[in-house]
Structures are given as C-alpha cells and as structure tokens.
Amino acid sequence: MSATKLPPSLSLAHEKGHITVRLKPNVKAKRLILRLDAKSGEPVATIPPGLSRQRLETFLTDNMEWLIKRMDQRPARVPFVAGVDIPVRDIAHSLVHVGQKRGTVRQLVDGDHYSLLVSGEEEHMPRRVTDWLKKQARADLQEAVDRHASTLSVKPAAIRIKDTTSRWGSCSSNRILSFSWRIIFAPPCVLDYLAAHEVAHLREMNHSSRFWALVEELCPHFEEAKVWLKEEGRHLHRFGA
C-alpha cells in the first residue's frame, strides 16, 4: 500500500496501552522520520512516497522503546493562566489576574520578583498574555536586527513574527526575515544570536565559512547561544497554546 493510501494515523499496542501515531505523507521526504510534534507533543511519522504499510508498521514497532522514552521525557504544558510562572527573557514571571475591566498586561518588578498583571475577563487571559509576549518579541528582534543590519550595511525587506516549530528564524530570497515569537522566553543573548544569524543571511544566503565569520562579527559569543538553542529550544514550545 502506498503512502497516499495510508490511514491518517496508526494505533500501536505496547505493555502500557496504545500509542497513536499521526501519519504525515510528504512527497519530498527521502526517509521515514519519527518525532514528537513540538506543540501538541503527539507522535508524528513523516512518510516518503511509495512506502508500504508493512514497512511502516515494522519501523514504528522497532522504534517503540525510543518513542515511549521520548514521550515520558516530554515537558509538561504550561498554560497562560493565573498562578503559573513563565520565563520572559529567561526571567521567571508570575501570571496574576487582576479584576479590572480593561484588558491589559502590565509588568511589575518588586525586588527580585517579576509578575505580569493581566486585567480583563479571566477567560481571555491566555490570548492577552500571548499578544503581549509577541509584542515584546517583535520589539526585541526589531532592535537586534536594526543593530546588526547597520553593522553589515544591509536592510531586510520586512520582519515577520510567527509561531513556527521547525525553525526559529529564516531569511527568504526576497529579504524577509521571519522569527518565532517564542524566542522571547530565551536569554537575551540567544535572541541576539538568532537575529545576527538571519541578518548575516542578507549577505550570505548559505552556511559557508564566510557566513559564520559574519555571525561571529555580529555576535562574538554565538557558539554558546547556538548550543543553548539546540539543547533547550524545544522546551520553549511548552508554554501557552
């Protein structure tokens, strides 16, 4: 049976019960890839063309122990509700709902304690916090991009803020820079590296030695930030919706 005739998902039995794996056919895929969705945490198998169901089931069965281990290691979701702590620029902020009618988000710093005071209807709290975080991310990224672009005497066509899971940033052929707003959870040095990385692509649309030399010129300690993003970045997707 070809990949296009496969069901939307497969349920696999193991000693702890059943695991449902969502199947995602991809005509460009060269091989089978099994991963956990960065947002939902559900198992997803990317299927190359022409793959038989028998081959798929064998692959999933052979990788069952790995999948169970990864699922057990999944960080718990952290919704934007009153009483939880979320990182903003790598500093823990407590979410506090205040009973004012006008829906706003206000940062409060009391010594070493940081809070986000969210007013308006409590049911709208997740959306208001998300909107506020996106604005903070855009402001920080705009500043960093402007600074690095000035150093290299380049100018992006536009800056876009998205909620991507496959990459933290990108530079298109028409010079549009795109970033995940979730980078606002990371340390500022990591956001700065991400901005430098994409700005450098405005000069070098590749990952050659010349490109990395530009990144180092803009962000001398980029290696540390690069490692942080690789090791810790996936945890940033657990916050909010």
Image: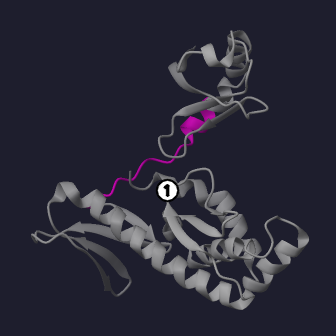
For mark 1, what is the residue?
A: 163
* Residue in the picture at 63% in, 75% down: 195
The reply, left or right, for residue 43 in relation to residue 196 is left
Say if the magenta span includes residue 119.
no
Q: Quadrant of residue 107?
A: bottom left
Outermost residue, right direction? 209
Q: How is the protein colored in the picture?
A: one colour
Q: Quadrant of residue 73?
A: top right
The answer to whether residue 91 of the structure is visible from this angle is yes
Residue 87 horizontal/vertical position (percent): 44, 68
The answer to whether residue 81 of the structure is visible from this angle is no
Say if the magenta span includes residue 74.
yes
Say above or below: 127 vs 153: above
The reply, left or right, for residue 31 in relation to residue 131 is right
Amino acid at dot 1: Asp
- In this picture, which residue range is highlighted in magenta? 68-83
* Residue in the picture at 62% in, 50% down: 166
Identify which residue, 184 or 86, lies in the foreground: 184
Residue 103 horizontal/vertical position (percent): 18, 69
Q: Residues within 10 Å of mark 1 (few under 14, many from 20)?
A: some
* Residue in the picture at 50% in, 72% down: 90
- The quadrant of the rendering that contains the N terminus is top right
